[in-house]
Amino acid sequence: MRSIALLPVLCLLVLLSMVSAGPHPHGEVVARADTTANTAADKATTGAAPTSDQTATKTDSQSDATATGAKTGKETGTQTGTQTGTQTGKSTKTNSNSSSISVDPRDPPGGISMLVPSNGAITYFKIGDQLTFQWKYTSLQVTPSAVNVVASCSKNAEAYTLSSNMSVSETGKVVWDTGKYQSNATVPLLTATYTLFVYDVNSTLGNIASAGHLGSQVGYSFGMYTPQAYTPLDHYICATCNSALTSTERNAIKFAVGMAAITIASFTWFATGTGVFSS
């Protein structure tokens, strides 16, 4: 009897459970989602650890920035080094007054040492021949832009130009055609002593050079002479000899010496024969 009494209660419970589990009826008002909660959730998501996609994107960006910085630094360093090296080398080569060359003021000035003719040899050249001069530079630390080559004559104080504005190399060489020069010379070559000088075009002959620069105080001395036609010895007159005698004067002296010798011999024979010197 008690079981039969509980049967209606069980049926009611089953019906209530089915009603609560079923779909909502059409037209029912559904509550709006809370946007404030969603916004807070988004912000929380933003501050949270990045996802795998975000990490990969950030890593790629950092790699690109690193590569760009390395490339820019490499290009900048290469370009700066190339420009500096090229400009410095060019300035040292062409500018004889380059401030980049440090010269000890105690060093001697530059000069030349003869190769042809050999240094220290005294050479005599015949006017009309081709003369060859070759030299090397000594103690030269500042290279001139160009040089002049002259032969200075001691007799007429004239400087004959052999070469002007000549480029500078390890060794210098000039060939002087004295025959060609002499045929058209306004100041002819003389039989005299000459000195070869090589000096900086930006300086003057005889100027005292500073340490390491090319100086022109010391040169190479040589002689030059004009050939003459053959003259017999008894007709030769020495133009540079003092109190030179002619052939007639020399014969008169010979005659006087001979007569004196004969006189002395005759007097000695006479005195001996007569006993003048006998005791």
Image (spheres, rainbow, N blue to C red):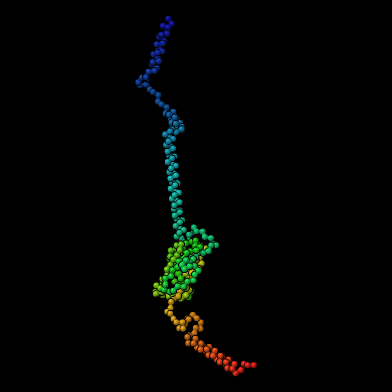
Residue farthest toward the top in the current orientation of the protein? 1
| 116, 173: nearer the viewer | 116
Q: Name the residue: 49% across, 62% down.
A: 140
Residue for point 52% across, 89% down? 258
Q: Nearer the viewer, residue 204 or 218?
A: 218
Q: How many marks?
A: 0
Q: Position of residue 69 (x, y in %)?
A: 44, 44
Residue displayed at 48% across by 81% down: 238
67 lies above or below 175: above
Q: Judge from the rendering whether residue 141 lies leftward or rightward of residue 270; answer left or right.
A: left
Up the image or down, 71 lies above or below 19; here it is below
In this view of the protein, can residue 213 be seen by the observer?
no
Q: Position of residue 87 (x, y in %)?
A: 44, 55
| Res 89 visible | yes
Question: What x and y, as percent, mark residue 101?
Answer: 50, 58
73 relative to 259, above or below: above
Q: Quadrant of the C terminus?
A: bottom right
Q: Quadrant of the rendered structure where residue 106 is?
A: bottom right
Extreme-bottom residue of the structure? 274
Q: Which residue is pictured at 45% across the width and 31% down the height?
A: 44
Residue sitting at the far left: 26
Task: Name the quarter where the N terminus is drawn.
Answer: top left
Q: Residue furthest right?
A: 279
Front residue of 11/171: it is 171
Pick the front one: 164 or 219? 219
